[in-house]
Image (tube, helix red, strand yellow):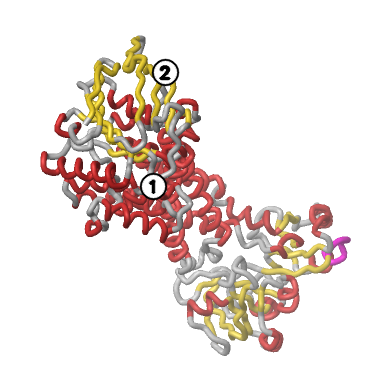
Amino acid sequence: MRFTHLIWGNLRRKKTRTVLTLLSIVVAFVLFGFLSAIKQALTGGVSLEGANRLIVRHKVSIIQLLPVDYKRRMEKIPGVAAVTHQTWFGGIYQDPKNFFMQNPVIPDEFLDMHPEVVLPADRRQAWLQTRTGAIVGRKTADRFHWKVGDKVPIQSTIWSKKDGTFLWEFDVVGIYDGRDKNTDTTAMFFRYDYFDEARRGGTGQVGWYTVRVKDSAQAAQVAKLVDAEFENSSYETKTEAEGAFVQAWAKQIGDIALITASILGAVFFTILLVTGNTISQSVRERTGELGVLKAIGFTNVQMLALVLAESCLLTVLGGMIGLGVAWLLTSRGDPTGGLLPLFFFPAREVLVGLGFSAALGLVTGFFPALQAMRLRVADSLRRI
Amino acid sequence: MNETNTGNGALVDVSGVEKVFHRGSEDIQVLKDLHLQVPAGEFLALMGPSGSGKSTLLNLIGGLDHPTRGSVTVAGERIDQLSDRRLAAWRARHVGFVFQLYNLLPVLTAERNVELPLLLTRLSKSERRRHVETALEAVGLTNRAKHYPRQLSGGEQQRVGIARGIVTDPTLLLCDEPTGDLDRRAGDEILSLLQALNREHGKTIIMVTHDPHASARASRTVYLNKGQLTREQKD
């Protein structure tokens, strides 16, 4: 700590240069935060519960429906603990940009299958008693200022009612929260029995099944048994782990991890050069001063540490500001209005970013620090 | 001040020293079989023309460079045999440097510049502050402590340089052309200050200078020419 003013003073020597370098680091880490949030939004959403959950869908495509009586057959398959289903409703609220997920489910089964969906007991009871009842995630409720007791109209883009209209009305009976940040609270769930009776077509058919296995170690085996059960039928299935299912969705856009790694790689390589150049130039400019420090007794290791501390201070400071800005910006939630419900900057990634900023400081400062360490005092003093 | 004289009674004993610089394929012999003893408490001036080896000799005595041959003993310690790391620690403990161009760090205030050598000691913050105040008082710059070098005149900057040189109470104060960049009046003030440090505080000072006016303030002057001592003159 006793060298802080010396390190800080060196960074303030050329304020414009330091500020510009700092800004470039800040921008890089803001980008890092945003890309982490996008990656999280596209590949997250698999809670620990997901480890023992399988998704069973039509073999051809997720938009093909499956018979509702598959449930009973699946329940008999060894290793299966519970089965429930959902169907994509594809509704909008008032305006096409107000997009969010709404699915018809069987309330008890759905809540038991998804313990990460937290709903007060009295609201659960109310849902069971209200045929047109729906539960809404906290984010969506806040977004549209919905509260329990409201009647909300949803325009389906897929399902019409028997009267030929596409406008459905639901009674909000509960607002659910996520057990953790990784739980999507932008969705709305309503009762399947109401939906199935009221819809014009597709009666007796559902979108996909969620299967909980008794032992997650046996999940792959159970998935094979499920698919074998419906092989050669009109509705063949494809069963996969919930995580793989979510990732398959994301892969429709591309390999998210590769895309983010490539962008960040290019950005940080540039930052490496920019910061490295700044520190190098700064060390070159004060060869004489470094010589004086050595003359008065600073050791080679202390010189190395001083320059490394200087570069680390710059990158960590830039990193902290950048990560802070990214955190603030992403904390406002999904910027797409519903396409990325799990858009947030995970705390784990913030820590990774901080570690990254320190590593950046060490790498960029290494060669200038080595240069300072190897400086011969008599030579450097002669250069003044 | 704890000083251990060498066997022959001198604080500094330079014996049979040679220094050769290699420039490409060429060897340049800067010092040749040089012998010099400096007793504790002496104010010695080293004079000679440019390239005579004055600064090189000062660097060897200050442990900034190693001789090619011969020995340099200061306060009973053969510093030519010390490793770089031990030599750095030795310099911090025993030597104060004063440079021609002051060599203050422009990003630090006067008091922070003076404090620099103390950062290498185990002194607490308050002890360091006390030492800095004493050193600045000794050079008459207490009221300029918070000023940056750019806000000080050349003479004042050199005073800060001297305060930095004496703040650890070193065994030796080595001055390389301390008045070389100053006008006559400021130069005189610096020389008076060095003289006072020598006479009143018993500091051993070795000063390189071109200026006979400056060397006249020293208690002894030795002359170098082409890497050898040619003559000496006592006060």
Mark 2 closeness class: few <14, some 14–19, many ≥20 residues within 10 Å: some
- Tell me what residue is drawn at x 39 percent, y 19 percent: B17
Mark 1 closeness class: few <14, some 14–19, many ≥20 residues within 10 Å: many
Left or right: B5, with B45 as reference point: right
Residue found farthest to the top: B25
List the residue tagged with mark 2.
Answer: B68
Which image quadrant is residue A132 in?
A: bottom right
Residue B160: horizontal and vertical position, in percent? Answer: 26, 48
The residue lying toward the viewer, choosing from A50 and B219, is: B219
Q: Look at the image and tell me whether residue A272 can be seen.
A: no
Mark 1: secondary structure? loop
Q: Is residue A259 placed above or below A381 in the rendered structure?
A: below
Q: Marks 2 and 1: same chain?
A: yes
* Circle 2: residue type: Thr
The label on residue B149 is: none
Residue A85: horizontal and vertical position, in percent? Answer: 72, 69
The part of the chain drawn in magenta is A74-80
* Circle 1: residue type: Thr
- Tell me what residue is drawn at x 49 percent, y 66 percent: A334
Mark 2: secondary structure? loop
The residue lying toward the viewer, choosing from A57 and A38, is: A38
Left or right: A263, with A218 as reference point: left
Q: Look at the image and tell me whether residue A6 can be seen.
A: yes
Residue A153: horizontal and vertical position, in percent? Answer: 52, 81
- Chain of the residue displaying label 2: B
Q: Sequence order check: which comes first, mark 2 or mark 1?
A: 2
The residue lying toward the viewer, choosing from A172 and B89, is: B89
List the residue tagged with mark 1.
Answer: B168
Marks 2, 1: nearer the viewer:
1
Q: CA distance from mark 2 to mark 1?
A: 30 Å
